[in-house]
Image (spheres, rainbow, N blue to C red):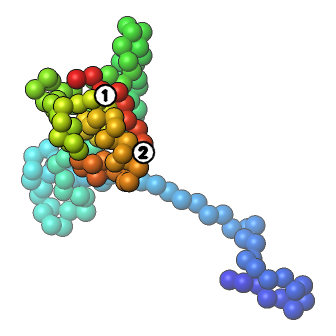
Amino acid sequence: QLAKSKHTGTMGPLRAPSNLRATSRFDYQPDICKDYKETGFCGYGDNCKFMHDRSNYKAGWQIEKEWEEEQRKKKARLARGNRGDEGSNQDYPSQTESDKPFACFICRNPFTKPVVTKCKHYFCQKCALEHYSTSPKCAACGKPTGGIFNKAII
């Protein structure tokens, strides 16, 4: 609501009244039918006021406890000399010798100075840079490379 007062000449949003207080209440406890969750049957049937769900939910303290345990394991790995993200990143599975390519995807020749992208595709350094000058996307899958080509060990 805009205030248009001829007396003061003010225009714009009105200030909130000082005698009203806005409060919010969040219900973090899902109301789930205990009988249905434990047995799969509820005597109230469709008239039950609770939600019929048998999946498991974690409370905030359980999520925090798992996160703290994960952080403790990472610190222990760092203390032993391993990298902190080793073994926890499932986005890039480790490749065996048979999984690694033997030729460049662009020129189809054996690698000369091989490089690898963020999406784990291998190219010759020259081919990758030439392709990047025309398109910032990976030549194999089309994902953005961000210009990041790491030295590959094949």
For residue 142, side relative to residue 10 (left or right): left
* Residue neighbourhood size for the residue with mark 2, other residues' Cα within 10 Å, grouped as few (<14), some (14–19), many (≥20): few
Residue 13: % across, % down? 73, 77
**Label ID, residue 113:** 1
Residue found at x 50% / y 57%:
25
> Quarter of the image containing the C terminus?
top left
User: In the image, what residue occupies the spot 72% across and 70% down?
Assistant: 16
* Closer mark to the observer between disc 2 and disc 1: 1
Extreme-bottom residue of the structure: 6
Which residue has dot 2 on it?
Answer: 146
Q: Quadrant of residue 48?
A: bottom left
Q: Work out how far the residue at label 2 is from the one at label 1, CA to CA, in angstroms.
A: 20 Å
Judge left or right: residue 128 versus residue 43.
Answer: right
Q: Observer-nearest residue: 67 or 52?
A: 67
- Vertical comparison of 1 with 116: above or below: below
Rendering quarter of residue 79:
top left
Q: Amino acid at mark 2?
A: Gly
Q: Above or below — where is 72 with respect to 91?
A: above
Q: Secondary structure at mark 2?
A: loop
| Tag 1: amino acid | Lys
- Across and down, in percent, residue 98 comes to 10, 26
Q: Secondary structure at mark 1?
A: loop
Q: Do we see residue 118 in this rendering?
A: no
Task: State the residue in front, 83 or 15.
Answer: 83
Counting residues from the start of the chain, the first of labels 2 and 1 encountered is 1
In this orientation, which residue lies closer to the viewer: 82 or 67? 82
